[in-house]
Image (cartoon, rainbow, N blue to C red):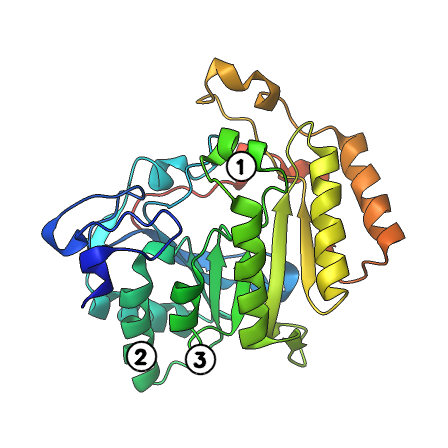
Amino acid sequence: MNILENCTLCPRNCKIDRTKGEIGYCGATDKIKVARSSLHFWEEPCISGTEGSGTVFFSHCNMGCVFCQNHEISKNGLGKEISIEELSDIFLVLAAQGANNINLVTPTHYVPQIIKAIELSKAKGLHLPILYNSSGYECLETLKLLEGYIDIYLPDMKYFNDKYAIKYSNAKNYFDISKKAINEMFRQVGECQFDENGLLKKGVIVRHLMLPGLLFDTKKILDYLYTTYENKIYISIMSQYTPLATLPNKFEELKKKLNPKHYDAILDYATSLGIENAYIQEGESASESFIPEFFGE
C-alpha cells in the first residue's frame, strides 16, 4: 500500500488517505508543495559555507509551534505545487548554482516523494550531501525509509518538559519521540565528517532554540545530549527567538525576546558540561530580517 493512502509518516498518525485529497494535521495532500528554493547563507557555517546551502522550503508542517517564524508556509500553506520530477530538477539547479548541499526544510510529510526525487537527481549526476532539516518530531519507520538517502541530519530538540511541548506545539511526548528520532539519525550517519574546507559531509547537528523563561528546560536538553553523545554530534544553541505580532494574548510570556543574560548563562553551562562541538549565535540574529520571504522563488 502507498503510505500516503494511510498516512503515518509522523507521530500524529492521522491515517488519512492523502491520495484522495483527505487532509490531516499537517495540511498536506499527496502533491508536493514548495514555498521557496534558493541558496541560503544563514545556516551553521559548516552547512552554508561561502557558497550557500541549497535550501528547499516545503509548505505545511506536522508541528504547529505558536511562535513559528515560517508560519506563512507552515500554517497558511503558502507555496506552489510541483511534481517529483520538478523537485528533482530543483535539486540539480541548486547544485549548478554552486550549493554546498541540498537542504530539505520541513520535509517529513513528503518523505516518499522526496526519496523518488533524490533517486532521479542522483541518476542525473547529483553528488551533493543531502540534508534533512526537521523539527525532530519524527517516526522511526519514516526515518528508516531515508537510510542511505540522507547524509546530514539537522533536527531540532525543542522541549524537555512535555507541558511546554503541548502548550506551544501541541506535540505530546515530544522529548521522548525526538530523542528516539535523533538516536536513529545518529545510527544512520554516525559522527560528523568534514571536507578539506570545513564543510559538513556527514553527521548530526541538533538545534535548540532557547525560548524566553525556559532556562531550566534548555539545561535539561543539553544534559541529555551531552550525556548521550558527548562530542560525537554538534549542538547548535540558538538565541534567534523572535516574538511575532501574530502571537495570541494567552502566550504573553513569549511576547518578548530572549534575555541575553540567560543565553550567556547557557553558554557557560554548556562549557561546564564539557561541550566542545557547538555553534552559538550573536544577539542581532533575533530579528525578523533574518526570516526569508516566501514568494515562490
Q: Residue at x 49, y 14 (%)?
A: 249
Give percent across and percent down for residue 240.
62, 39
Q: Regarding mark 2 in the picture, which secondary structure is present there?
A: helix
Tag on residue 74? Answer: none
Pick out the residue farthest to the top.
249
Give percent across and percent down for residue 92.
34, 73
Q: Regarding mark 3 in the picture, which secondary structure is present there?
A: loop
User: Does 27 sit left or right of 52 as displayed?
Assistant: left
User: Does 54 sit left or right of 6 as displayed?
Assistant: right
Q: Which residue is mark 1?
A: 165
Q: Amino acid at mark 1?
A: Ala
Could you tell me how far apart the alpha carbons at marks 2 and 1 are, in whole angstroms?
35 Å
Q: Amino acid at mark 2?
A: Glu
Q: Regarding mark 1 in the picture, which secondary structure is present there?
A: helix
Q: Residue at x 62, y 35 (%)?
A: 286
Instruction: Sort mark 2 into few (<14), some (14-19) or many (20+) by Cα contacts within 10 Å.
Output: few
Give percent across and percent down for residue 246.
44, 22
Instruction: Sort mark 1 into few (<14), some (14-19) or many (20+) by Cα contacts within 10 Å.
Output: some
Name which of mark 2 and mark 1 comes first in the sequence: 2
Q: Which residue is mark 3?
A: 148
Total numbered circles: 3
Circle 1 or circle 3, nearest the eye: 1
